[in-house]
Amino acid sequence: MTSATQEVTARVLDVLVLPGLDDLTDDQVRGADCVWCRASLTADVAVDFGEHTSPSPWSTSTIGMRWYPRACPACTAERAHRGLFEHAPSCEQCVDAAERCEISRALYRLIREGRR
Ligand SMILES: [Zn+2]
Ligand SMILES: [Zn+2]
């Protein structure tokens, strides 16, 4: 893979926990800045979470609003690392055989890409 830009499944996003739309700047909503640290992003380093329509589980006052969350690889790796610790103990597949859990594999990939 040549780019950190990729689609991440909704279930992985649940683990990463995106911030509420209410707390974001316009630049964060349109994907120009990292949703977590507000750093400016360029297309080749951003992790792309795809298009979302509010309400997300995180917000109620911005119903129907479209947004395009993106993040820098470092923030994503940090979130993924934290999320993995919370996900693994409560996931039957991970307890059984973590290498076969798609969520866990996706999180590991995000952590690796953030550390390049
Ligand atoms: Zn960031
Ligand atoms: Zn799992």
Image: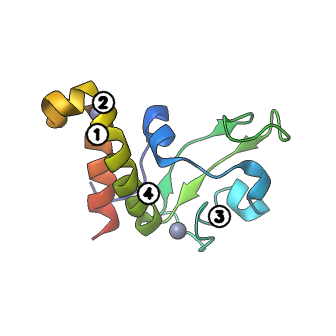
Q: Which residue is mark 2?
A: 91
Q: Secondary structure at mark 2?
A: loop
47 sits left or right of 31 in the view: left
Q: Which residue is mark 4?
A: 79
To which quarter of the image does residue 87 belong?
Answer: top left
Residue 82: give x, y in percent of width and height: 38, 55
Q: Which residue is mark 1?
A: 88
User: Mark on residue 106?
Assistant: none
Q: Are marks 2 and 3 in contact (CB under 8 Å)?
A: no
Look at 82% across and 34% down and name the residue there: 63
> Is 104 above or below relative to 75?
above
Q: Does any atom of ligand 2 lie closer than 8 Å to the CB of label 2?
A: yes
Distance of label 1 from label 3 (alpha carbons): 32 Å
> Is 16 above or below relative to 71?
above
> Is 56 above or below relative to 112?
above
Distance of label 2 from label 4 (alpha carbons): 18 Å
Q: Nearer the viewer, mark 4 or mark 3?
A: 4
User: Mark on residue 32?
Assistant: 3
13 sits left or right of 96 in the view: right
> Is 3 above or below relative to 86?
below
Q: Is residue 31 visible?
A: yes
Q: Are marks 1 and 2 in contact (CB under 8 Å)?
A: yes
